[in-house]
Image: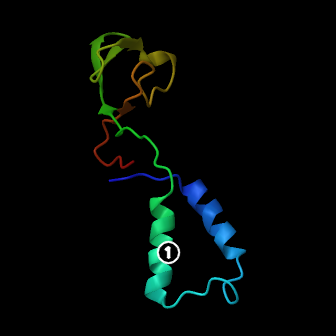
Amino acid sequence: MRLIDADALITLLKECQQLDWNNNIAPVSWNHAFDNFKYMIDDEPTIEAEPVRRGRWTAIYCPFDTCSECGTSFDTTMGNFNYCPNCGAKMILNDENNID
């Protein structure tokens, strides 16, 4: 899977919108037009992305909890830690109905 910068693609498409399609670059067919768009998209730069890491706070001793992903302990009573401040893992809530 390739991830592309959607903002860069929108900018490119806005530039295409300004072209004089009827007089200069009218596509021979819709298939030809779609091929051109495909090439334009293929030329867009890709972005680096990491999968979302998910973890849980594991109680070790009050008031400290440990991140299940990196093992770092934090006083989670000091704030609402939806993410581990150390590794960035998104913390899964204990509520089974939680959908992110």
- Residue 80 vs 32, above or below: the answer is above
- Residue 57 vs 19, above or below: the answer is above
In this view, which residue lies farthest toward the top? Answer: 61
Near-viewer residue (64 or 68): 68
Q: Is residue 13 left or right of residue 81?
A: right
Q: Name the residue at 49% across, 26% down.
A: 80
Q: Position of residue 58 (x, y in %)?
A: 27, 20
Residue at disc 1, secondary structure: helix
Dot 1 alpha-carbon crowd within 10 angstroms: few under 14, some 14 to 19, many 20 or more: few
Query: Which residue in the structure is indicated by mark 1?
Result: 36
Near-viewer residue (87 or 46): 46
Q: Is residue 16 left or right of residue 5?
A: right
Q: Position of residue 47 (x, y in %)?
A: 46, 45
- Residue 13 vs 68, above or below: the answer is below
Q: Name the residue at 28% across, 17% down.
A: 59
Q: Name the residue at 35% across, 46% down.
A: 98
